Every structure is written in structure tokens, then in C-alpha cells.
Image: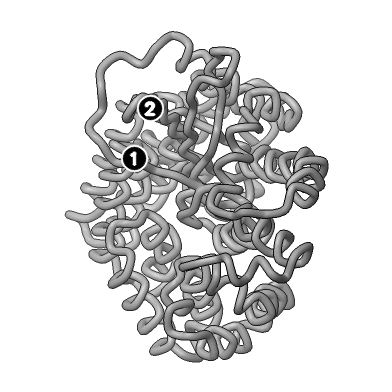
Amino acid sequence: MRKTLASTAIAAIIALVLACFARADDQPGPSDEAVSLARQLSDAVRREDAAAVEDLLDTDALFNRLSAGVKASAGFQAGFRRTFPAHVHEITGAIVKAGSDYHLLRVRQVNGEWYILFRVLQKGGGMNYHDWIAAKDQQGNLKLQDVYVAISGELISQSMHRVYVQGALAANPGLLDRLSGKDKELAANLKSMAGIAQDWKKAQYQQVLNDYKAFPASLQEDKNYMVLRLLAAEKLLKQSPQEYSAAMADYKRLFPADPSVDLDCMDALFETKEFADARQSIDRLETFTGGDPYLLVLRGNTYKLEGGNDNLLLAKQSYQKALEEEPGLAKAYWALVSLSLETQHYDETAALLTQIRQKLHIKINDLTKLPTYAGFVKSDAYKKWIANQTADTPAQ
């Protein structure tokens, strides 16, 4: 379902990527300015235009967020500001690469700021949510100030704050005595934290777990390193299922309402056929998003994989509801095609393929070369359908 999801999460954590979702009741009527900003962002990401995304950012506000609480020297601050555009470019580059299907879900106002929530579906498989925070800049223009990537559960300013602290300490080791709380603990464990990041990059998953267990108790409860532990344990699920179960239990205990819990655990729940638990995760994600039709596709998948006539009917209903809520959702169409093939309802297969071609403007390949369609190709429904197709139809 999301084969690149784990690697995307870690890239986000290690390479400074993303985060902030604030819960509050929706307030009526997103402004025209907020909707326009959302559309500009969506268009820029779909074009993979990182520069256009940067133009929508209030980088001064982002810098103020990431540097808050750290009394770094004036020289370090000036130097960091000079390199800041490169950091921003790295972040926006990661965002546009992640957003092959970047779908606006809602725009809402919370405590005077606008929150703009996008669903991110990747070509290689993978689901995420980006929740952007927008507010007025010093010139009175609505600009993006921060973003939350649900799978890593952190503000971009929080991710960059750690980088800022590290740099400030390197420039002035005496700063350590003036730090407090998490910043002080971060500074005291920089070497260990760098080690666990390197072990993840090298795919040394058992060593990641060993690194994590060597952390002080307070760092073991830091979300970033719990995510690393959980994803490393997921990589070793077949060898050590108990390690994964323990990691997931600790994560859920400490962050019960965090969407990263459900996004990070979803693959494992499908793999271990814990479909009821997967549906509970989907329930929580629906609460987080305020409703996302793609989650209905995932819910339908749990029923389909669970099997049985009643569940197959529930799967079909979920896919159909997804299309009612988002008529252009290609994933829902293809899920219905897959279900029709499995149940050998080939007239439905033909009708769905026609709708995909006409409504989504997706051309269909030579189905005779695809084993999944073997039964359909032998059917009368296929003969009728192919007779209506043009000769130049490429592929899905």
C-alpha cells in the first residue's frame, strides 16, 4: 500500500522535513485569500516547482519559529541566516518530490491562523498529510509559515530547531550552560543522535534498535527516536515480532492521538492481517483529517483482504462512497476494477474501464498481456468492450 512510507518518514526526520496540526472546531468560510494560497501551493507542488513553493513562504516567520528560545551569538545568527535559503530549498525540494498527487482536503481558521491540509499520495506508493500554517507577513500578505508532515508528526520549525541548536553549540560551546529542558538534553546527546541517524541510513536496523535502547530514558520517549525505533522494528518484523509489538505499544501509549502512530503502523497491520485494528487506525485518521475519501479506499481494502461475501460487499460500498465524495479519485476506480475481477463481475469491469478512460482520461493498455485480467479477456464482456476501444490505447 505504501512501500516508500517508512523511508519518506525518516528522510523527513533526518533531512529536516516537516510538521503542525492544531485541533479546533472548524470556523466557517475560508477566505478567498486562503483558498487562493492553497491553490497556488497545490499547482506549484504538482509542477514540482520548488521555487514557486518558496515564493509562498514567509521565511522570516519560519526563522523566528525555529530559533525561538536559543540565545545564539549574533555572528552565528547572521551566518545561519546566510545559509537559510539553502535549507529552505532542501525542504521545498523534498516536498515537491513527495507530492505527485497533492490533493487539497480543507482550509480552516484556528486562532487567527489558516491551516491548509493536503493529502499526499506518491507514485511509488505512500500516503501522508501536509498541514500548512499560513498567516499575514509584515507586508500584510498571507504566507505559509510552517508545515506538518503527519507521518513524522513534527513542525518543520521543530526539525530545524535541532539543527540550529547543534550549529549554535558548535559556534559557542558555552551556550550549553544556558540551555534548558529538551534543548539541553539534545545538546548533551548529539553524538548518540547522529549515530542512530547514520545507522538508519546504512539500513543497520538492529543497530538502530541498540542505539535507541542506549539512550537516556527521556530521549527514548522523544517522538523522533520512537519513530526510528518503530520503523526499524517494522523492518525486522518477521525476525522479531515481539520487538515491533513492544515498540508500537510504547508509541501508542505516549502519543495516542498522533496521526503519525497510525500512518507508521498501517503497513504492519495489513501485513499481519490485523484488519480490525487497521480500521481503528483509519477511524482516527478520519478524525484527524476531518474526512478523506482515500481513507475509504483503505477501509475497503481491509474488507477485501479479509474476504467473505459480506466483507466484499462492504469493500464495494466503501470504494463507491469514496467516488461519491471525490469523483476523480483514481485509486477508488482501480480498487473497484480489482474487486470486479476478483468476483468475476466482468460487465462491471468493462463499465469501470470505460469510466476511467472517459472521466479520468487514462488510456488503457493491452489487457491481454496482464495476468490479472486473464478471466476478463476470455469473457464476452471484454469482446464487447474492446470493440469500442480505439487502436491507440496505451497503459495503466
Residue 194 in the image, given as x and y percentages of width and height? 69, 75
Given contact means CB atoms under 8 Å apart, are the residues at marks 1 and 2 in contact? yes
SS type, badge 1: helix
Viewer-proximal residue among 396 and 299? 299
Does residue 132 lie above or below 224 as drawn? above
Q: Which mark is residue 106?
A: 2
**Amino acid identity at mark 1:** Thr
Image x and y of residue 40, in percent: 59, 19
The residue sitting at 76% across, 28% down in the picture is 51
CA separation, marks 1 and 2?
8 Å
Where does label 1 land, which residue?
A: 289
Q: Earlier in the sequence, mark 1 or mark 2?
A: 2
Say if 351 sits above or below 304 in the image: above
Give left or right: position of 71 versus 344: right
Instruction: Work out whether residue 203 can be spotted.
Output: no
Asked whether, in this view, residue 307 is left or right of residue 153, the answer is left
Instruction: Determine if residue 92 is in view.
Output: yes
| In the foreground, 281 or 372 | 281
